[in-house]
Amino acid sequence: MQRIKANIPVDELPSWALWQRRMLESAHQSVQPFLDHFTHRSGASAGEFIWDDAWGGGSPDDYFEPFFNWPLVYLMGGSADLLAQAERQFEAVTRQLMRLGSYHKEYGFREDQMHQSEADVLFYHLCLADPNAPGKLERARRFSGFYLNEDPEAINYDPEHKIVFSGLTGSKGAIVDKSEWSGGAYSPVGTTMEPYGLPFFDLPGIASVKDLADPANAQAMSKAMHDRWQAGDAPANLAITSMVTNAFLMTGEEKYRDWVVEYTTAWLERGRQNSGLLPDQIGPSGKVGEFVDGKWYGGRYGWTFPHGFLTMHFATLDAGANAYLLTRDDSFLELPRAQMDRIFELGEMRDHRQEHMSVGDNWASQLDEIPEGEKSFLVPYRYGDAGWFDWQPLTALYPVYLWSLSMSDEDRQRVERLRDAEAGDWNKVHPFRDKHDSAHEQPWFQFLAGENPEYPERILHASHQQLSRRLAQMRTDEYVGTQHHIHHWQWGNAVSSEALIQLTLGAPQPIYNGGLLHARVCYFDAVQKRPGLPEDVGALVTELTADRTVLRLVNLNPVEDRELIIQAGAFGEHRFEDATFHSRTSEWPGELGGYAGSDTAPPVTTESRKVDVRHRHLTVHLPAAQEITIDLTTRRYVNDPSHHSGPFS
């Protein structure tokens, strides 16, 4: 392994580095107050949420979601306590859900993948942070085995038609309900589901969601949902590829790669046959729209209801990224690219104030700055019998995430077309925090393009502001012990990872619905032999191209040296070919004493140096108060990815 040494003194402490270290420390300080407030701290229920069993565990993903980014912050240099507490909470929540009857064999059942994938990301990040922890390997095999039909009680996949049997899957197998409708009602009026409108538009006497306030109409809609969603694959199931990819990263076994390739390829072909848009129901016979009169829309968590493109495309990106990671074949990125292109082509300049947006709060800070009467670029997220509807901004996560994977000029131009079409300022950092802990892709892209130099400080300031506000909100919270909203725990999680991931790893925040961490670099402390930046070290990825990674490393400690190892890719999937950096050629720091201005530091002169690396790892020694900027020639996706690719594995 090549080793280089920094020897350029830090002339001025960069504020972004100071704020990075502050964010890492504040994340650590946020954990214990959260646990003390929301969970039992002792006894048989230690770690479990303060929640009466009589209230049930009806939304099991929400029990895991508050902890999803704790391992990610550890991976960047956060305290070891972040990982230890995340591990404890995973065990406690699993135990609680098993007791509540919401989990079976430590995993969900009768769950749609839009929600199950939100629970699964914590497990993926824990596997990446410490793949050798007790139980990780066995669980990775068992959970993925549910979808490889390795558990006779959990048959979820049809290898003949290359479909998952149902939109409801898990540890008890796919839920295929061929029984007659036994009654029930779907009446969302007055609930959080009302903004999403109708699942179907062809039922007599039901023209709007308000019509479902009529009990007879609510029963008719319930019957239609039962009959039309009784079975069949859905694009949301593409998120399962992350579970199976995680098993490959843990084991290296080819059966997992083969499954991801087979399943993703099948969906890729279905999209091609439908002009790039994935049909949202594939029946047991392999027929498109088998229970919705042959339509390409109308399936469970599909184009019509409830989120349409919004969450469907998360799973589509997951699958494309996973297949690309495992095969190095970038043609799999056509899966999300073709669908996104189709939606972009439908976009129009519209007045957002005249539109009903099902998740309008997602865009509030972005849209509120647009002057009255001015239009912005909106795209339709959903499709029903009357055509496209639910016009909203195209989230920049989709094209930016795709570009970060492909690094192609064409995908970069896709991002730029969206930027140029929108009315908002892409350099601006909006101080908000959603449950995905993301949505600052626009200003980050501008920073990498050299057009937003103050972004690192601004995003770190905004992130710390949100962290502090959440802690303050939690201190005044009085709902613990009551039957509060199931998302209440998520709202209390102050830990934030987006800014740190973008700035230190050169990557977007992982997709909340089942996304793995696809990053350009990651770090290891060479002395402590653990993942993450060493204490006192700041890192900033300033430029990314298809074959170059430029990053700056700073040791803020004026007394102690630090040594770290840079890894090419979160899973060691890339390789550094060579490293170019500047090395000091002048004398420094000079001798003690003297008069007449000799206490002034001598001028620093440097020369460019280049060393061969040809490895996935590079060691950098950072003496006290020294820094280095390294331009790494990078070959991407040349190694088999693994959770065990680290230098200490």
Image (cartoon, rainbow, N blue to C red):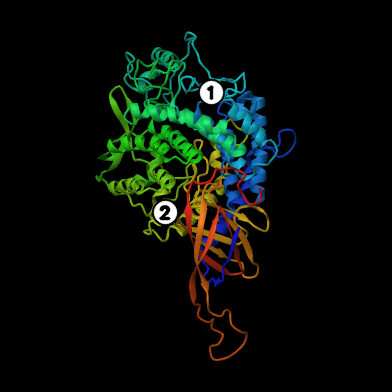
Above/below status of 101 relative to 354: above
Mark 2 surroundings: few (<14), some (14-19) or many (≥20) residues within 10 A? some
From the top left corner, tell me how far across and down residue 106 is, in percent: 64, 28
Left or right relative to 595: residue 430? left
Q: Is residue 50 visible?
A: no
Q: Is residue 305 left or right of residue 488?
A: left
Q: Residue 217, percent across and down?
A: 38, 14
Residue 595, how many percent across, how many down?
A: 57, 91
Q: Quarter of the image containing the N terminus?
A: bottom right
Mark positioned earlier in the residue sequence (2 or 1): 1
Give left or right: position of 132 versus 345: right
Residue ID for mark 1: 169
Residue type for callout 2: Thr
| Tag shown at residue 545 | 2
Q: How far from the left and from the top, in percent, is residue 586?
A: 53, 79
Q: Residue furthest right?
A: 43
Residue 187 visible, this angle: yes
The residue at 38%/48% (across/down) is 408
